[in-house]
Amino acid sequence: MDHYGSLSDDYYLNVNLNTEMDLPQNRETVLHFFEQIQKRYPSMRNFYNRDRGEFVLEEDKDRGNYRWATVENRRVCSGFVNPSSVDDALEQHQMVLEVAPYALSVSPIDCESLNVMFGFDFTYRGNHNQLLVEALGLTPAFDRMADIPGATVICNEPSIQLALDSDCRTQCRLSFETRTTAYHIRTGEFPEEQLSVYLTARRYGSLDPGETYVSAMKHLSDVCETLIGDYVIDNILRPLQHTIAIK
């Protein structure tokens, strides 16, 4: 596993292609799409349909690292949990984005948005919201509120979203998901849950002339890796690791 695997308990790299028009949902088309993926990755053999009309093909999850892909009404997704390398995950996502236009009739003008997301999960038994305060601090305007006698932080999920070009077509978002509830705090019984850090790069609108879904994905992945290397590792991931380790 590459160095990202050492920064959290689990990490994953997902790609979502959101379309303006409904995707085909008939039996032959959906099965043909997944069959093309399975030819490349034979271990993706678990196929099922969720209640919301979401078709899923995935590997066995019990080994800790696994691939998955889904087709929804207006979204095609590809994900890899704990890949051996970023390149290994991108190879899968590239294959999915190469097959989707032909198997699912996804035109370059049918792109509502394309997302690349790097996720990092930290397993922690305790108040995730307070952990973020201790590891990352609060904005100065909130510092004194957190020091109110007897007060306990029960929701703390900071996020920041940036436009990376003048027309706001390419954006990035850094966000957190905590899984501590008021019930856990009230009872003092904290299950071992995962605190998640998400970095998403997204581009909106139809593809430009000469652009492909694969080239757009690679650009977004490069954006994510640059942001992770320049900002996220030292300012987010390592402080979280350190704070959890000394708890």
Image (cartoon, rainbow, N blue to C red):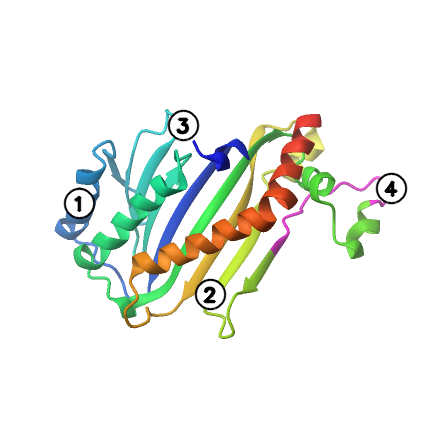
Magenta stretch contains residue 222:
no
Report if the CB atoms under discs 1 and 4 are less than 8 Å apart: no
Considering the numbered disc 3 on the image, is that residue within a helix, a strand or a loop?
A: loop
| Residue under numbered circle 3 | 64
Report if the CB atoms under discs 3 and 4 are less than 8 Å apart: no
Q: Earlier in the sequence, mark 1 or mark 2?
A: 1
Q: Label 2 vs label 4: CA separation?
A: 43 Å
| Residue under numbered circle 1 | 36
Disc 3 residue crowd, few under 14, some 14–19, many 20+, Cα 10 Å: few
Q: Residue type at mark 3?
A: Gly
Mark 3 against mark 4, which lies toward the viewer?
A: 3
47 sits to left or right of 190 = left
Residue 170 got which mark?
2
241 sits to left or right of 23 = right
Q: Position of residue 206 (x, y in %)?
A: 33, 70
Q: Earlier in the sequence, mark 3 or mark 4?
A: 3
Considering the numbered disc 1 on the image, is that residue within a helix, a strand or a loop?
A: helix
x 29%, y 62%: residue = 212
Q: Earlier in the sequence, mark 3 or mark 1?
A: 1
| Residue under numbered circle 4 | 149
Q: Residue type at mark 1?
A: Gln
Q: Residue type at mark 2?
A: Thr
Q: Label 1 vs label 2: CA separation?
A: 30 Å
Q: Nearer the viewer, residue 169 or 44?
A: 169
Mark 2 against mark 3, which lies toward the viewer?
A: 2
Q: Label 3 vs label 1: CA separation?
A: 24 Å
Q: Earlier in the sequence, mark 1 or mark 4?
A: 1
Mark 1 against mark 2, which lies toward the viewer?
A: 2
x 20%, y 39%: residue = 40
Magenta span main SS: loop
